[in-house]
Image (tube, grey):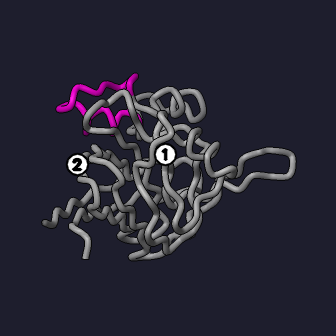
Amino acid sequence: MRNEILVPGGQGRATRVETGQVLEIINVQGKQVCDLIAFNVEDFAEHLSPSHTRSILGRVTLGLGDCLYTNTRAAIFEIEEDMVGSHDTLIAACDYRRYELDYGLPGHRNCRANFAEALEPYGIGYLQVPDPINLFQNTPVGADGSLGMEVSAAQTGDKVVLRASMDALIAVSACPQDQNPINNWEVTDIRLLVRDPS
């Protein structure tokens, strides 16, 4: 089984990934951040949790072979391949208020709204969207604890490959942030590939 989805820059998409299947998240043109959220299909109250993942791993960074964990401390994905090695587990999804308060741009497309649009068929609303893991995002932590917003290190075709540890509903947003450098000031596409293991 193979399911391929193009996520246009600045938009979001959702799909199912079954236990044991592989999810490839591919940076089509490079430099594009991809916010990822996920839910246990048996109970949407259980979801991918960056804070629980950090707590279990004992660090804010992700590495090859690491699992991503839910808010019940269950593994939901394992990182099988990572061509970039720089991802963010700290920053909330951008939202309407972020663009309005920080940039004076009411109504700007944003990751939280992208998730809500993609998940509407599943009954998951805007305020139910959990914090994401921001793949390909370069967020250095300064010695004083400050968070940087640097250009993504992802190059054309770079990808992260995750193996599902449970039946999951995932949603991604090709982050529409064009007001700071994380996407190199240009919003581009992300490609998803869900496939059975080789």
Question: Which percent across, then down, holds residue 17?
Answer: 25, 53
Near mark 1 (Cα within 10 A), the count class, few <14, some 14-19 or many ≥20, is many
Numbered disc 2: secondary structure:
strand
Residue indicated by mark 1: 69
Q: Nearer the viewer, residue 77 or 143?
A: 77
Q: Is residue 191 visible?
A: no
109, above or below 136, in the image: above
Question: Which percent across, then down, holds residue 6?
Answer: 24, 60
Residue indicated by mark 2: 15
Q: Which residues are magenta?
A: 112-128
Question: Which percent across, then down, holds residue 54?
Answer: 62, 46
Near mark 2 (Cα within 10 A), the count class, few <14, some 14-19 or many ≥20, is some
Residue displayed at 31% across by 62% down:
23
Residue type highlighted by circle 1: Tyr
Q: Main secondary structure of the magenta part?
A: helix
Residue displayed at 46% across by 63% down:
79
